[in-house]
Structures are given as structure tokens and as C-alpha cells.
Image (tube, grey):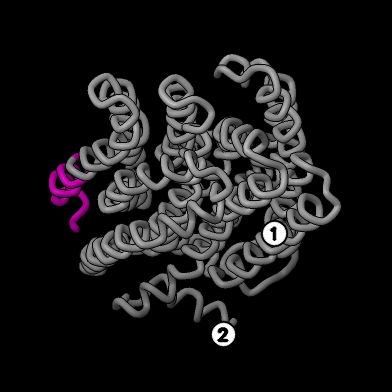
């Protein structure tokens, strides 16, 4: 009981900068480790399989991410409603909602696995893959798809561990899953070697990250949440899906935009352009994971205080979160510029022409990290307030509308440079939209 009270204080107490960083740090590391899955695969495939396998992995990865993004829908949307329910003091209802979300996601994962395996080849061909590229996409993708239920659970629990007051446990499980993936990649790709199919060991790592939490929450524990008997609640599910729609749209839109980038890059720069973009995406995954992890970590606290009517603390959380996001932005811009060359050498140092293209792309793309965090946090902030419509609007404008328009229009003016610059332009416009909504909604939500 004592530990449970300590966990409640983590949600209900006043948050200074130190407490806020300590509470959100596990979520940040969790999301970064999850992002490293693709990075680890890319490193071993590029250096031990070759450029053809590396291009295929980067080409099909956005399609795979669309399927597993259901975990973010149910995790963030469910987490927001569960935190609100906890803030109102109804623990039994919170556990029932938690259980319903987990059980539904397991069933959804099985369905998406079947559909994914059936439609992977035509999807890759539709996007422009053919010959060796198409075959490599199918080989890698079908193996990864087998772990879709576990991947959905993993993304979901990354959000729900914070809501359960157990962000550190979530971090430990995610680190274990990431290390499993890295070790098996090294074994299957570099040592044995099994080639591109060996890189699909990512699926085993996802099983670790998705199934271990099931065992934890299924038994008695000292967290705020546990799996119990539940009844289907259609009204709550609609609210959960509405709340989490912004995160779902964000992930689906990011994947669709990545596909569009690949199509444009094949047109303007050939397969080398897809490979260069893959390196940028690895850095993008990790840096945006910092913003997303912070937003996921602070969301339960925001939802709790809004549910409890503690508007003074809500203002405090918003102010401190925006300042920390500004610090993250400056650090990420600087880091991406400094790390551009060593990272490019690590992935594509064996090809001088490809290396030169990647370095130039980095010099432009890096400035997108200066703006991205504000829209990501703002979208998550409104999700935590259970304003799914506003959150979805910010997210869809950022990850779909602005980026699609930019990547289609700017290359007409600046050719390949227009593709690299399009992300910077889109993130800047998203920042402006986020600012408008934060200012415009202050009176309604009392922050």
C-alpha cells in the first residue's frame, strides 16, 4: 500500500523541472530504444548485406510501421482516459478500461498480421518496388509481420507504463527488448550470416517488449493498474480512439509521407536517394523519439491534474514543458550537425557518392529538429486533456498535409534539394499552428 501511495504522488504532486525530467526520462529512453530497432537493422544490413538490402529495408519499413501504429492509438488514447479516471478516484473503472484496451489490441494484432502478409507484395509493387528490391522487401517484411501483435502491445505499454506509475519498469523491459534485437541482429546477420532475413530478428525483440508486460500486469503488483475481468464499453472505446487518433494519424501519416519521399527520391536520385534518406530517418527516429517520449511521459500527469481540477499545476506543467522542449530543440539541432559525418560514415562510408549525398542532406534536414518538438508536444497535450479533435488536427497538419504539399511542390523548384528542405518547411508551419491552438484554447482549459 505504501508503494502505491508513492506512485499516486508521482501523478498528483507539484512538478518542478527536476521531478518532471525524472518522471519523463524513462519514457524518453523507452521510445529511443524502440527507435533503435530500425537503426540496428539498418547498420547490420548496410554493412554486412549491402546497399541493395539496405535500400529494401528502408523502402518497406514505413509500410510495417503503419500496421503497428495501432499500439499508439490505443496506448495514448487509453492512457489519457485512464489517467483522467484515476484523477477522479475511480480505480476499478480505470483497471477495467486498461484491460479492455489490452485485450482488444491483441485481437487487432492478429488480424493485421494476416492482412499484412496477404497484401505486402502488392503494396510494395504499388509503391514502385520491382525486381530484387521487391523480393527483398517481401522477404524482410513478411518475417517482421509475424510479430505485429507483440509490436502493437509494446508501443501500447510504453504509454501505459507511465499511466500505471511504473515508467522505470517500462524502461527496463524496453531496454531488454532492444538489447535482444541488437544481439540477435549481430548473430544472425554478421556472424552466421543469414542475410536480410536475419535482420528480421527485430520481431523477437518486439516479443520481449510486448509479452513481458502482459505477464506483469496479469498478476498482483504494486502499480496503479492491472489486468482484470472487463466488459466491452463501446462509448469508452470511441473516446479512446478519438483521444488517440492524433497519435495514430501522426504515425500513419509519417509512414505515408516516408513512402512518398521514397517515390520522389527514386525519381530524382534513384536508389541512392532512398538509401541516403534511410540514414536521415534513423536520426529522425531517435531525435523525434525524445520529443514523443517526453510528451508520452508527461501526458498522464497533465490528464490527472486536469481531471482533478488542479489548473494551477496544469499551467505549471505547460510552461515547464515548453521550456524543456526549447532546450531539447537546441541540443538536437547542434547534435545532428555535429554527428552528421560520423553517422553517415557508419552507415554508407563504403560508397563515396552516396556518402556525399547523405552529408549534404543532413546539412539541410537537421533544421527540422529545431521546430518539430513543439507540435508533437502540443498534440499530446490536447490528447491528455481529452480533446482528441484538436490534437488530431495539429498532428494531421504536421505529419500529412504540410509534408505532402512540401515534398510535392518544393522539388519542382529546387529538385533534390527541395526534398531535403520540405521537412524543415513542414515542421515550421506546424509550430505556427500549434502556437495558435495553445493560445486559443487557454480560456477553455484554464491553463
Q: Main secondary structure of the magenta part?
A: helix
Q: Which image quadrant for residue 132?
A: top right
Q: Is residue 310 visible?
A: no
Q: Which image quadrant for residue 334?
A: bottom left
Magenta residues (range):
433-447
Which residue corresponds to mark 2?
Answer: 2
Q: Is 338 positioned to the left or the right of 176 in the image?
A: left
Identify the residue shown where x is 68% and y is 44%.
103
Q: Quadrant of the N terminus?
A: bottom right
User: Picture coordinates of residue 383 (x, y %)?
Assistant: 37, 47
Which residue corresponds to mark 1?
Answer: 182
Question: What secondary structure is marked by label 2?
Answer: helix
Identify the residue shown where x is 63% and y is 70%.
172
Q: Nearer the viewer, residue 436 or 8?
A: 436
User: Picture coordinates of residue 133 (x, y %)?
Assistant: 66, 25
Q: Label 2 crowding class (10 Å Cα cut-off): few <14, some 14-19, many 20+?
A: few
Q: Is residue 440 visible?
A: yes
Identify the residue shown where x is 63% and y is 54%.
40
User: Picture coordinates of residue 359 (x, y %)?
Assistant: 39, 47
Q: Is 264 positioned to the left or the right of 371 in the image?
A: right
Q: Quadrant of the C terminus?
A: bottom left
Question: What secondary structure is marked by label 1?
Answer: helix
Compared with residue 356, is residue 30 higher up or lower down, i.e. above or below? below
Q: Which label belongs to residue 266? A: none
Amino acid at each position: 500500500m505504501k508503494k502505491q501511495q508513492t506512485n499516486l504522488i508521482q501523478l498528483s504532486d507539484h512538478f518542478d523541472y527536476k521531478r518532471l525530467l525524472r518522471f519523463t526520462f524513462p519514457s524518453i529512453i523507452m521510445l529511443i530504444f524502440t527507435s533503435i530497432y530500425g537503426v540496428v537493422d539498418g547498420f547490420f544490413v548496410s554493412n554486412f548485406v549491402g546497399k541493395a538490402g539496405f535500400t529494401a529495408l528502408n523502402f518497406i519499413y514505413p509500410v510495417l510501421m503503419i500496421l503497428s501504429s495501432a499500439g499508439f492509438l490505443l496506448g495514448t488514447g487509453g492512457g489519457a482516459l485512464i489517467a483522467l479516471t484515476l484523477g477522479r478516484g475511480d480505480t476499478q473503472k480505470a483497471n477495467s478500461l486498461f484491460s479492455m484496451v489490452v485485450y482488444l489490441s491483441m485481437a487487432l494484432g492478429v488480424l493485421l498480421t494476416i492482412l499484412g502478409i496477404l497484401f505486402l507484395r502488392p503494396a510494395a509493387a504499388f509503391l514502385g518496388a520491382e525486381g530484387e528490391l521487391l523480393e527483398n522487401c517481401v522477404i524482410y517484411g513478411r518475417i517482421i509481420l509475424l510479430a505485429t501483435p507483440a509490436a502493437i502491445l509494446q508501443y501500447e505499454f510504453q504509454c501505459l507504463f507511465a499511466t500505471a506509475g511504473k515508467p522505470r519498469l517500462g524502461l527496463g523491459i524496453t531496454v531488454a527488448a532492444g538489447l535482444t534485437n541488437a544481439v540477435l541482429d549481430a548473430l544472425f546477420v554478421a556472424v552466421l550470416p543469414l542475410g536480410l532475413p536475419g535482420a528480421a530478428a527485430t520481431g523477437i525483440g518486439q516479443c520481449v517488449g510486448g509479452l513481458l508486460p502482459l505477464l506483469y500486469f496479469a498478476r498482483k503488483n504494486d502499480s496503479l493498474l492491472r489486468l482484470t475481468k472487463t466488459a466491452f464499453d463501446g462509448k469508452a472505446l470511441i473516446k479512446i480512439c478519438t483521444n488517440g487518433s492524433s497519435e495514430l494519424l501522426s504515425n500513419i501519416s509519417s509512414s505515408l509521407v516516408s513512402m512518398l519521399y521514397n517515390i520522389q527520391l527514386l525519381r530524382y536520385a534513384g536508389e541512392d536517394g532512398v538509401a541516403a534518406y534511410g540514414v536521415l530517418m534513423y536520426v529522425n527516429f531517435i531525435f523525434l523519439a525524445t520529443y514523443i517520449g517526453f510528451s508520452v511521459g508527461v501526458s498522464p500527469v497533465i490528464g490527472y491534474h486536469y481531471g482533478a481540477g488542479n489548473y494551477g499545476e496544469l499551467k505549471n506543467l505547460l510552461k515547464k514543458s515548453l521550456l524543456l522542449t526549447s532546450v531539447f530543440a537546441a541540443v538536437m539541432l547542434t547534435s545532428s550537425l555535429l554527428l552528421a559525418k560520423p553517422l553517415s560514415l557508419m552507415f554508407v562510408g563504403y560508397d563515396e557518392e552516396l556518402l556525399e549525398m547523405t552529408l549534404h542532406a543532413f546539412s539541410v534536414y537537421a533544421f527540422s529538429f529545431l521546430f518539430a518538438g513543439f507540435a508533437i508536444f502540443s498534440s499530446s497535450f490536447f490528447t491528455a486533456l481529452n480533446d482528441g479533435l484538436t490534437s488530431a488536427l495539429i498532428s494531421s497538419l504536421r505529419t500529412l498535409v504540410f509534408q505532402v504539399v512540401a515534398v510535392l511542390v518544393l522539388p519542382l523548384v529546387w529538385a533534390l534539394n527541395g526534398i531535403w528542405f520540405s521537412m524543415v518547411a513542414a515542421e515550421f508551419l506546424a509550430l505556427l499552428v500549434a502556437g495558435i491552438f495553445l493560445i486559443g484554447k487557454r480560456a477553455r482549459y484554464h491553463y
